[in-house]
Amino acid sequence: MATQSPSLSSLEADVLVIGGGSTGVGVARDAALRGFSTILVERSDLADGTTGRFHGLLHSGGRYAVKDPSAARECIAENRILRLTAADCVEDTGGLFVSTPWDDPEYGDQFLQGCKATGVPAEEIPVAEALRREPRVNPDIRRAFLVPDAALDPWKLVWGCARSAEEHGARILPYCRVLYLEMDGDRVVGADVRNERSGEEFRIHATVVINAAGAWAGQIADLARCTVNVRAGMGLMIAMNHRLVHMCVNRCKRPADGDILLPLRTACVIGTTDVFVPDPDQTEIRQEDIDLLLDEGEKLVPGFRQARALHAWAGVRPLFEDTAKVAETRDVTRSHALLDHSSREGVAGFLTITGGKTTTFRLMAEAAVDAACRQLGGPRPCRTADVPLSGSENHALYQISHRLAEREPVPQAEEIICECELITRSRLEDTIKQRDTTSLDDIRRLLRLAMGPCQGGFCIYRAAGILHQGGHVDQAGANQTLLDFLEERWKGVHPILHGDQLRQARLDDWIFQGILDVEHVPV
Amino acid sequence: MNDAIRDSLDHCVKCTVCESFCPVSQVTPLFPGPKYAGPQAERYRGAGPSADSSVDYCSGCGICTQVCPQDVKIAEINSRARAALWEKRGVPLRNQLIARPTVIGRLGTPVAPLANWALHNRTVRGVVQSVIGIHRDAPMPSFAGRTFQRRSRSHHGPSAGPAVVYFHGCGTNYYEPRVGEMLVAVLEHNGFRVIVPPQDCCGLPLQSNGNFPAARTYVRRLVDRLAPHARAGLPIVSNSTSCGLMLKREAHEILGIEDDDLAIVSKSMYDVCEFLLGLHERGELRTDFNSLPLTIPYHAPCQQRGHGIGKPALDLLALVPDLNMIELDVDCCGIAGTYGLKKEKYDISMAVGKRLFDDIAATGSRVAACDSETCRWQITHGTGVKSVHPIELLYRAYGLGRNRSVPVKAGRPTAQVNA
């Protein structure tokens, strides 16, 4: 299973993938589907880096149609593929580009031209029709365009790819950090890896090592004395309590801060900002950025500032720049970069795939594995555009009401553990067993545990109890995992605390401090 | 566009107060509870109908909204979800039928004896249950035969005095015209001239059965009849708790009608006891009450909470010498309008009402008082005790039953009937 610790002190594979975001699992799945023996290592949990922190937009390409046509072309092609192969991860919300009073309506013409030139289906609709579809959108918009944007569940996608890779023989090893790359002369031949949970170190021999570490790709390349200039563009997002819009609503202007509001599962997400950060592990949520997003939200949806914000978080985009310095991170192309270090630095057996975006992860993986094939004895055809993930075989797209529908007909004997996200006890227990994890945050990413309005106030102590009851942790361990989780959640809650969420936080606080006295539990 | 009902879900902190007060989820697992069906499920609702057909088991009593300390419009969220559900599925014949009291009233009134026989005949009711789905034991009122509208046309009233408009509703018109006559007599005793405009159903049963478009048509039609009076500055009184609430709040808050006529009608609407208590507070109510040496249990209908007026009937009846009202501490009788008529919900409705029935029985009284007509029918059905509108007690305390021939005899019509 996905998270079993490797017991061997050394492993062997055709392909070693470093990085467990969408790109990494995409590469691992692609390689496994082509019949290569494949191992993936990720320093923490899958999708814990950029992928799990992106806004969730499956781009139609509209956003890039004017200034980055090649990215737009890639987006629409991948959008169509993912709707078929990863249907269960995609909700067909549709997208709307609107010209608010703050946007030049003439940009709409450029937008339409750009969409036409790049093959992104876009259709101008009357403002009244747009407002009928999205009644909360600013009634003063002057133009509106429909595009096939969609919402993409990053965790489902990543785990779907990981499981598919495993079904085809790959080993997926989360919480395994690369310490060194093994060199044989000018050739990378594997990696020394440490299991971050057990502390055990082991070696993986591989014919080709693919660096899919995204914003961290430069750090990995350093281990082979190669250079990869990836800048980390930090983007801030805020999840709102419920869907204020049911389509992905974009400002029709050149991409800028706070110009996307999209429904993602039960919440809706406003994003983003774009700030260069020197270290992708050091992201800081600044109050002025929160204010900026809320103000921009207010322009799209009047009343936005009164709506309940649940959580704020930052992700880092891997922005690859090969040449001169670019001042603005938004001006870096959103197309991906595939670097073969044998031609760049004379280091064989080592490829880096970075840049890009989650929408195009499959294409990136295809390019990387195509390149790997050249070092592995010749081309083998890529199958990821045709083979659906399990759960998506019938191409049935995800719908918002799925979890509610599963609870019908009532009565159902089973307890609901997380009321906000409708997670039943058995689903929670099955996931704990499957993942063999004691981290409530790992469970959160798989199930959306504690991601609703109360942010874990009512479910997370139940989940900790279930971990203990199932024998996965002892008492102290259960307490510790509860505390770890609360600390992690708090990071995202405190920057947006006001109004309803502040009231919720007080109630949660009474539960954890007043009833459970969490600060004094034995750990 | 604001969506105040949905937006109110943001205030939910999941405290569960609503769940502990919900009379329905306390007696059946078929309704997952107001917090679940309301602010929680609403987050899973998109443009189409909701996936949780269990929301149909909400009786719409509205207690959840009233007890919510965070001001979440729980019952309203549920009400809209039900409407979306039925809009998609099509409202079944049974619900279409019981939601149109004027249609039933017009059909039943001319053949009242026959209709009443049928309504209370076990065999007929058995057939109705299996064909249409109205429970064979559900409480059904009897057609009066002669409607309140017809009676009021031949009523002698004062030709002078301050005017008040009477919205009597369907229950009074077709089943309990005596209550209407007593209400008119009480107002006239206090010097008012009572105007009874022609009127139709307010649309509430259609709303609670999920047919919002038809409900809007009905309430708009009724508002058209009442608005000219409201614009003339006349107060409108009602003895139907839920129909009055429809005009006061729900047509706007649940059906989403934005309309000046509705707004002025809403402002002019009074529950009749609220109106009379207002008179008393201004020193304008006649207090020439005779002694009524009775002890009577009183149930405040759950819909009355939505009025935000307390329990004015109790304050009024406290003015009556020797009348001892026992205030019952039960939220809901279970009927919730048409909910308890339905085959699949009758047992739930009776289980909800059980505590009330037991409490009334424990008083040993042969009469109970309650403002809402469907609740009175349910109380009588559940206890065998006669149930009366508080206005009837005031009527008797004023001695009006002895002084005037009842029912009012035909004669020169003086009560204005405005078209």
Image: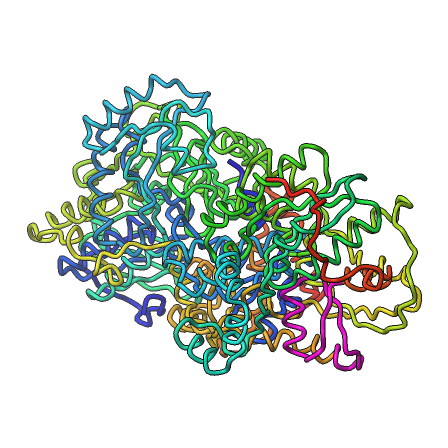
Residue A246 within the segment the image draws in magenta: no
Residue B377 within the segment the image draws in magenta: yes
Spot occupied by residue B50 in the image (x, y as percentages of width and height):
42, 57
Residue A483 visible to the viewer:
no
In this rendering, would A411 be left or right of A177? right
Query: What quarter of the picture does the C terminus of chain A occupy?
Result: bottom right
In this rendering, would A193 be left or right of A498? left
Which region of the structure is painted magenta? B360-389
Residue A427 visible to the viewer:
yes
Note whether A280 is above or below B402 in the view shown: above
**Image quadrant where residue A487 sits:** bottom right
In this rendering, would B10 be left or right of B237? left
Looking at the image, the residue that sits furthest to the front is B411
Question: Between A487 and B287, which is closer to the camera in this rendering?
Answer: B287
Note whether B78 is above or below A237 in the view shown: below
Spot occupied by residue B277 in the image (x, y as percentages of width and height):
83, 51
Tell me the residue at 89%/68% (across/down).
B292
Note whether A448 is above or below A316 in the view shown: below
Snapshot colouring:
rainbow
Question: Between A108 and B265, which is closer to the camera in this rendering?
Answer: B265
Spot occupied by residue B312 in the image (x, y as percentages of width and height):
80, 56
Query: What quarter of the picture does the N terminus of chain A occupy?
Result: bottom left
Note whether A342 is above or below A522 in the view shown: above
Tell me the residue at 54%/30% (across/down).
A295
Spot occupied by residue A271 in the image (x, y as percentages of width and height):
45, 37
Looking at the image, the residue that sits furthest to the left is A378
Question: Between B30 and A423, which is closer to the camera in this rendering?
Answer: B30
Question: Between B210 and B140, which is closer to the camera in this rendering?
Answer: B140
In this rendering, would B289 be left or right of B104? right
